[in-house]
Amino acid sequence: MALSLHTWCWYCKQEIPPKSEACPFCSKPLDSSKKVVRCPKCGKYLLSSAERCVQCGLVLREIERPQPPQQPQPPAGGLDASMLKPTRGLASEAAEVPVPDAEAEPAEAPAAEPTAQPEPDAAPSGNDALPPPDPDSPDMQETLRTLEQLEAQERYEAQERSTRKVAWIAVVVAVLAVVALAAVFFFTRPNRAKPGADSPSKPVVCAEGEHEWLPADCIHPKTCAKCGKTEGEALGHHFVDNVCTVCGAYKKPFYFTGADCERDGGIVIFWGDVKNYTGVDVKELQVRLDLFDKDMNQIASETRNVLSEPLAPLETVQWQLRYDDAAIKWKYWRVAAVDYTPVEPLPTSP
C-alpha cells in the first residue's frame, strides 16, 4: 500500500488543503515555507519540497502526494461532430451508420510486446537506489537552516505568550493588592461612619448613653472613641524626681538635685547633682546662675559650663561652679540648664 504525504500547518500542526493561503484552524497566513509535510516513518515535520527526511533518511520523492481534483479533459482529437448530433431514433441512426466493405481486409492486431524480465544484476530501486543523505550538501544545509528558523520562531512565539500571561497575572495581583489595602484602610480608619449612616464623610453624633468613653490621662480629657466628644479636663502629670508617676514622661531634660553653696571670703562655690533625661550622650552642659535679693528681684546672672566629662542618658554627675561675690550682695540663688551639646557620632567606615 503506497504511503501518502499530506500538507500540514507549521503553526498549529493541523492537516490543511495543499493550496490553502491561510490556515482554516488558526487563521494564520501561509506561504510555501509555512506549509510542511510529515515524514510517515519518524513523524518529523519537513519542508514541502524536501526529497528526503533529514532525521531518518526516508526518500520522499516516490511517496504519493495528494493532488487537488482535476477537471475532465476533452479527447486529444477534439469533439466529434457525430457526438453533438441530436438523436432522432434508432432507425435514422442505423441509416447513417456506414456499412463496412466486405472485401476490406481486417486490420491486423498489434503484436504484443514481450514483458521485460529484470536482470539478475540490476540496480535496486526505491530507497535502496539512492545514496544515504549527505549532511554537508548545500540542499541538506538549506533545509536544516529553514527548519531551524521555523523552530526558533515557534519557540519565540511560545515564550512571548508565556511572558504576556505572566504580565497579566502580575497586573491582576497588583490590582487585588490595591483593593485589599483600600478595604483595610476603609474599615480600620478612626472615627469612621457607622454602617447605615447617610454619608461616610458625615460626622458621627452619638446619642446620650451611647458614647464609648476613654478615660482621661495626663494630657487628654475623657473622650468618646466614636464621636470624639470630651468631658472634664486632663489629669495632668504627677512628677516625682522629674518623672511622671502616671505616664512616665520627663518634666525637664536635665534634673538638678542636692544643690548647695559655701562662701569662702569673696568667692562662692555652688555644687549639686544633675541627671540627663535627653536620651543622648552630652559632652557640654551650659547652666545659668541667677542671684536674687531678699525681695526676689534678680540682681545678677551668668552662664557657665558645668560638665568635665560626657554624661550618658539617665546617668547622674556632680556639677560645681565658682562665682566671685566681692561686689554683689545676694540672698537667694537658682541654677537651670540653658543649652547642651551632644557627643559627636563616631565616623562610619567607608
Image (tube, helix red, strand yellow):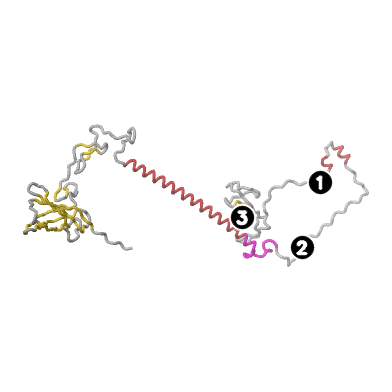
Quarter occupied by the C terminus = bottom left
Magenta-drawn stretch contains 130:
yes
Numbered tag placed on residue 195 in the rendering: none
Identify the element where label 2 is drawn.
loop
Residue type, numbered disc 3: Arg
**Which residue is rendered at x = 23% and y = 33% of the image?**
209
Q: Mark 2 or mark 1: which is in front?
A: 1
Magenta run includes residue 171: no
Mark 3 sits on what residue? 38
- Dot 2 alpha-carbon crowd within 10 angstroms: few under 14, some 14 to 19, many 20 or more: few
Provide residue 307's location: percent of width, then percent of height: 17, 59
The amino acid beneath tag 2 is Gln
Q: Residues within 10 Å of mark 1 (few under 14, many from 20)?
A: few
Q: Position of residue 105 (x, y in %)?
A: 91, 51
Task: Specify the label residue 117 is tagged with.
Answer: 2
**Which stretch is magenta?**
125-142
Q: Which element carries disc 3, helix, strand or loop?
A: strand
**Of callouts 3 and 1, the N-terminal one:** 3
On the image, the x and y values in percent for residue 274 come to: 15, 55
Quarter of the figure with residue 319: bottom left
Question: Please, what is the three-letter code of the amino acid marked with disc 1?
Answer: Gly
Q: Which label's residue is closer to the chain start, 2 or 3?
A: 3
Residue farthest along the bottom direction in this orientation: 121
Q: Residue at x 62, y 52 (%)?
A: 35
Mark 3 and mark 1: Cα distance apart in space: 42 Å
For disc 1, the marked residue is: 78
